[in-house]
Image (cartoon, rainbow, N blue to C red):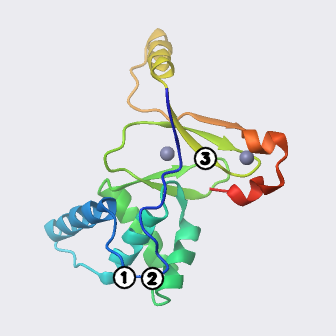
């Protein structure tokens, strides 16, 4: 079993343009550029800023949080543009949308990542990724016993993380 706590930011965003984007953002931008070109759509600098900021924020980024970060970097970017760009990224397979029980749409980078499921803390909102082969196999077996063939699944476990269970005062600040 592999547990991955939210991926660390690859790049600081407080100084746009001063640092090269991480390779994740680079590869995503190249792929997006190619995808847009094939469809005769034009490239935009605003889109680049959104993609770079998304990668810098790591996994499970709520769209409104991304809007706030992007607009702090470039106030000319509208919320609608951010929403539209993230839908585009999902369409071309660069980002995966997630909607947990709080109803917010979050996105996580898709590049080079295998299937994983999520543990979500109802106290502080922390999201932990996990992969467990036995659970994967068991789900397939259960489905088969009902005559199903599984195409995909989403497993979300809700509960309180260790910090919240201990009642740490600082746990709320760790919201991811
Ligand atoms: Zn918690
Ligand atoms: Zn995830």
Residue reaching furthest to the front: 19
> Do tag 1 and tag 2 residues touch (Cβ < 8 Å)?
yes
Label 2: element kind? loop
> Do tag 1 and tag 3 residues touch (Cβ < 8 Å)?
no
Q: Nearer the viewer, residue 145 or 65?
A: 65
Q: Nearer the viewer, residue 98 or 15?
A: 15
Disc 3 residue crowd, few under 14, some 14–19, many 20+, Cα 10 Å: many
Confirm or reject: label 2 Cβ below 8 Å from ligand 2.
no
Q: Which residue is mark 1?
A: 18
Position above or below: 105 against 43: above
Report x, y in % for residue 119: 61, 38
Label 1: element kind? loop
- What residue appears at the point 78 percent right and 56 percent down from the top-left corner? 170
Confirm or reject: label 3 Cβ below 8 Å from ligand 2.
yes
Quarter of the view holding residue 173? bottom right
Q: Which mark is residue 15?
A: 2
Disc 2 residue crowd, few under 14, some 14–19, many 20+, Cα 10 Å: few
Q: Which residue is mark 3?
A: 127
Calculate the distance from the C-alpha at mark 1 to the C-alpha at mark 3: 30 Å
Report x, y in % for residue 155: 55, 33
Residue reaching furthest to the top: 145
Which of marks 3 and 1 precedes in the sequence? 1
Which of marks 3 and 2 precedes in the sequence? 2
Q: Quadrant of the C terminus?
A: bottom right
- Left or right: residue 152 versus residue 117 is left
Which of the two discs, 2 and 3, sits closer to the camera?
2
Which of the two discs, 1 and 3, sits closer to the camera?
1
Position above or below: 44 against 145: below
- What residue appears at the point 47 percent right and 70 percent down from the top-left corner? 83
- What residue appears at the point 48 percent right and 58 percent down from the top-left corner? 58
């Amino acid at each position: 079993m592999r547990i991955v706590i939210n991926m660390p930011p690859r790049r600081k965003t407080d100084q746009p343009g001063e640092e090269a984007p991480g390779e994740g953002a680079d590869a995503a931008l190249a792929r997006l550029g190619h995808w847009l070109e094939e469809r005769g759509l034009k490239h935009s600098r605003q889109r680049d800023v959104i993609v770079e900021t998304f990668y810098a924020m790591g996994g499970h980024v709520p769209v409104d949080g991304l809007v706030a970060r992007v607009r702090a970097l470039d106030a000319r970017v509208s919320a609608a543009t951010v929403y539209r760009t993230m839908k585009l990224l999902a369409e071309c397979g660069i980002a995966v949308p997630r909607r947990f029980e709080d109803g917010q749409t979050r996105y996580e980078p898709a590049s080079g990542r295998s299937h994983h499921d999520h543990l979500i803390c109802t106290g502080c909102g922390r999201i932990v990724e996990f992969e467990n082969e036995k659970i994967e196999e068991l789900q397939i077996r259960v489905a088969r016993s009902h005559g199903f063939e599984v195409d995909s699944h989403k497993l979300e476990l809700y509960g309180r993380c260790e910090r919240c269970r201990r009642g740490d005062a600082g746990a709320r600040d760790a919201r991811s």
